[in-house]
Image (cartoon, rainbow, N blue to C red):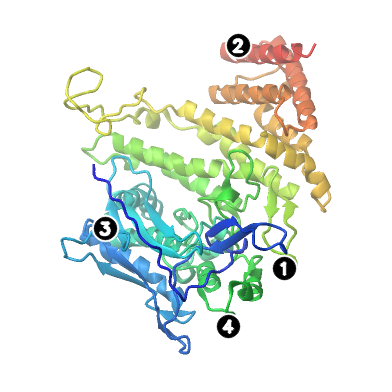
Amino acid sequence: MSVVYNIADPPGHADYKPRYADDRVGIYDDVYLSFDNDEVLSRKLRYIVRWDLQPSDPALPVSPASHPMVFYLSDSIPERYRPAIRAAVLKWNDAFLKIGISDALQVRDQPSDPDWDPDDIRYNVLRWVTEAGASFGADSQTLYDPRTGEEFRTGILISADVPLFAQRNWTYAVDPARYGRSTDPMPQKFLDDTWLGTILHETGHNLGMQHNFIGSLAYTAKELQDPAFTAKYGIASTVMEYAPLNLWPKPFGQGDYSQTVLGPYDYYAMHWAYAPVPGANTPEEELPTLRSWAAAWSDPRYRYASDEDVAWGDGHAADPRVEQGDLTDDPLGWCKVQFGLDRDLIAGLDAREPAPGEAYEAETDAFRMLMGRYDACALLPTHYIGGQYLSRAHRGDPHAAPPIVPVPRSEQRRAFDLLDTYVFSSDAWRLPPSLLQRLGYSEWSGYGYVEYEGYGNLPQWAYDPPLRHDVPYAENIARLQNQALRFMFGPAVLARMSDAGFESTAPGAMRLADLFAWTHAAIFRELGGGTNVKPIDALRRTLQARYTDVLVDLYQSSAAGVPSDARALARAELAGLDDATARALRGTGPDADTRAHLAWLRARVRGALREER
């Protein structure tokens, strides 16, 4: 192992002028505390992080950059990928030409000089990374002066697995969905477009841009199905989205699969961050103009929301329009189409995979990928439950909405109906046994299987078998369903829903009682027949048991933030479930599995209720 240390002076360009950040535009901010001004309401001072890109002759409409961002293509990058990677970086020059700067970004080949070192801090390098299990597709590298926000080194690490991701998307999804096959070679354009989307995104980071996860909301489904539209505007308003594959089943039209151009937000953000402000000599003098430029947040083409807005794990995120991996201005409608597409692709797997002579592991790989696509949409509807439309617009901005508007009850109901149909219902998961029988893996340990101490030295990446030979299908479904339930009944979501009646100006706001009633109807519908209960299948039994656990945990919870009404409603649900299971057990209809399940539910419920006495 060698360690390279770089100790260097920051650039200190005399003509560089810091620029203040704005929460409505997604440029990285360099934040620190300033104690030299008492005429402010906060000590926080935020400069944006950016390269020193200025026109060499401001008097001309367009002139070359005085300090261009020069990248070097590492020799380690395979030759066949370099044209697309180079083109993606240079595509950003389109944004700078609009503000009077030419050749702002340049790409050069690695010098033939043997003393040239890609680790030298003076060079911005695009370099190739090989990993046994890739942890990323590409990753930007940025260093900046914390006193001013001026960048002095950038670069991109490029994973060797990007072509593999493209190949799997083509073989398992695009080729069968659009052409009814899975044997056609991946077109070069499909791979090049994947490279464009990947490198455009990381170069945006190098220019100071943050993620923008509301960018997918700018376009309609019809627009994304139009190749002429996507070729001009992309599949999202920005390359800084985590946009999924823009794939539509027939007979829908099909636009570009990846983000291959800069979107309207990208041009807008680069103008805001880099365009000179006429007549302004100090950062303070720029502020009135910058604030007026940033006032466009309410326009769907120029909206911005970033990583903190997708922190769904603890319930901090609240706006369902801000998502990773969704498309169109109607994400629920888009997900409904994707559910159908993925189910059809899974249903036809046996006819496509594996190819004659191949191991069945290819079908397992395809199945896992398609289920991953399905799962990506399965949790999205939960984010509408107790959701809030958030606005970064400032007072006085055009078409500004209030900072917080609860999601309408009708939209929450629509989202819940999707969950009921595609996540909670057993029909959503019913697959033929013949398909599940084929989902094995290749038992191929070779020399040095690690179970035998001192025998060989096989690395983990070469053979790392799962515990089970089959796919744990029911276990995976239960995990996903439990994740959906735990999110909707989490403290932050319940608290938002409890307060929605105070915040909503529309009649009939979503109530906590609605969520409990909807969930009960979706999960315990088999118990609506009194003593005449039909057999409950294994997936539903597990789902009912998980939801009962959620109710018990909620009822007994002492966690901060859980509304008292939520605990009361959970208790009422448990009492009702006690009665319903008792009635069902008085009948003679259910099979042994169902009777044992109902008895277990009743014991679990009665045990929780007994603790209150």
Q: Residue at x 44, y 81 (%)?
A: 55
How would you rate the neighbour count of disc 3 (Cα within 10 Å): few for under 14, some for 14-19, many for 20 or more? some
Instruction: Work out whether 211 lies above or below 354.
Output: below
Mark 1 or 4 closer to N-term? 4
Q: Residues within 10 Å of mark 4 (few under 14, many from 20)?
A: few
For residue 278, the mark is: 4
Task: Determine the secondary structure under disc 2.
Answer: helix
**Secondary element at tag 3:** loop
* Residue 12 in the figure: left or right of residue 300: left
Q: Quadrant of residue 542?
A: top right
Q: How far across and how far down the image is residue 184, in percent?
A: 28, 53
Q: Earlier in the sequence, mark 1 or mark 3?
A: 3
Q: Residue 241's mark?
A: none
The one nearer the camera, 119 or 445, is: 119
Distance of label 1 from label 2 (alpha carbons): 58 Å
For numbered disc 4, what is the local secondary structure? loop
CB under 8 Å between callouts 1 and 4?
A: no
* Quarter where residue 39 is shown: bottom right
Q: Which residue is mark 3?
A: 118
Residue at mark 2: 596
Seen in the picture, residue 95 relative to 464 is either above or below; the reply is: below
